[in-house]
Amino acid sequence: MKKVLVTGGAGYKGCVLVPKLLKAGYSVIVYDLMLFGDAGLPKNPNLKVIKGDIRDMEAYSTAVQGVNSVIHMACISNDPSFELDPDLSKSINYDCFEPMVQASKKAGVRRFIYISSSSVYGVSDAPNVTEDHPLVPLTDYNKYKGLCEPILLRHQSPDFTVVIIRPATVCGYSPRMRFDLTVNILTNHAVNRNLITVFGGGQKRPNIHIEDVTDLYVQLLEAPDSLIAGEIFNAGYENHTVLDLAKFVKHTVESEMPEKGPIRTEVTSTNDNRSYHVSSKKITEKLGYRPKRTIEDAVRDLCHAFKTGKFRNSMSNDEYINVRTVKRLQLQ
């Protein structure tokens, strides 16, 4: 049985990804700080959950022994992380990255999949932002995501296949839910306030359904080395302005939960000017990867979760907002 270690595996994407890996026949190690606990993970004899810090090289080096592949997702995530101590973001998102890669390689890991971010592009007027586009970091988060990429590529070798994915903003339901991502935020407000507040509105933002992006991560474990070794891939689907996203959310929530309508939309200013139209042509041509789900599907899934009582105080509960939780726990 092939063994895969997933850093950040108890997080938003991890709680959707891990069951897919287990179903595909993998033995899985989740290595995570457990800031949000591990209640979103399944109980399975082929799953080992380790509470660990990726900055602790002794613990990580032990955990990665006997592992075939690593999917590295753990980080201080999303762009408002500048609200935190910048040294914390740097230590987790950048300083420990190469030591992790080196420890993985030394342990005999054959494949290292690094989950970067399409936010590394910052602001661009290009009609289609490809993987060759210059990186224009606007926050510590996307700066360090981008700086880790060339470090990883230097370690590519015949015995150590590395690949970098730059996913679009993820949306949709997870057992470890986040309401600090654009479509999820808009849906939460539409359902609970009957009002969608749009910050800015004109910024172009690519999105991808959480089920689609986690399907991709599983696919990357099986792709031939020759197709992915040393490669960088965008992974997005729908490129829309934030105002258009709000319209999709409004119409879908009103359809799925008519008792919530009519839902108003108001536009206000923002200091978050990230705007880019991502091209996913390369990953489609090279790997045959095509997302299957839409933004409306993500909103429908969230509406179903709201109707079945999956969320507790979603407007005020810090557990749904990554940065608030990190600040409350005073992570150092």
Image (tube, rainbow, N blue to C red):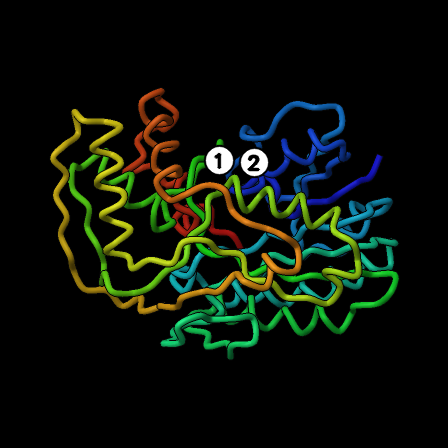
Mark 2: which secondary structure? helix
Mark 1: which secondary structure? loop
- In the image: residue 167, left or right of residue 31: left
Question: Residue 294's spot in the image, x, y percent?
Answer: 41, 43
Residue bearing mark 2: 15
Above or below residue 146? Residue 84 is above
- Give the label on residue 273, or none: none
Q: How would you rate the neighbour count of disc 1 (Cα within 10 Å): few for under 14, some for 14-19, many for 20 or more?
A: many
Foreground: 207 or 39? 207
Are dots 2 and 1 in contact, CB under 8 Å? Answer: yes
Amino acid carrying mark 1 in the image: Arg
Residue bearing mark 1: 176
CA distance for labels 2 and 1 = 6 Å
Q: Residue at x 44, y 70 (%)?
A: 128
Foreground: 262 or 64? 262
- In the image: residue 59, left or right of residue 157: left
Mark 2 and mark 1 lie on one chain; the one further toward the N terminus is 2
Question: Residue 91's spot in the image, x, y percent?
Answer: 59, 64
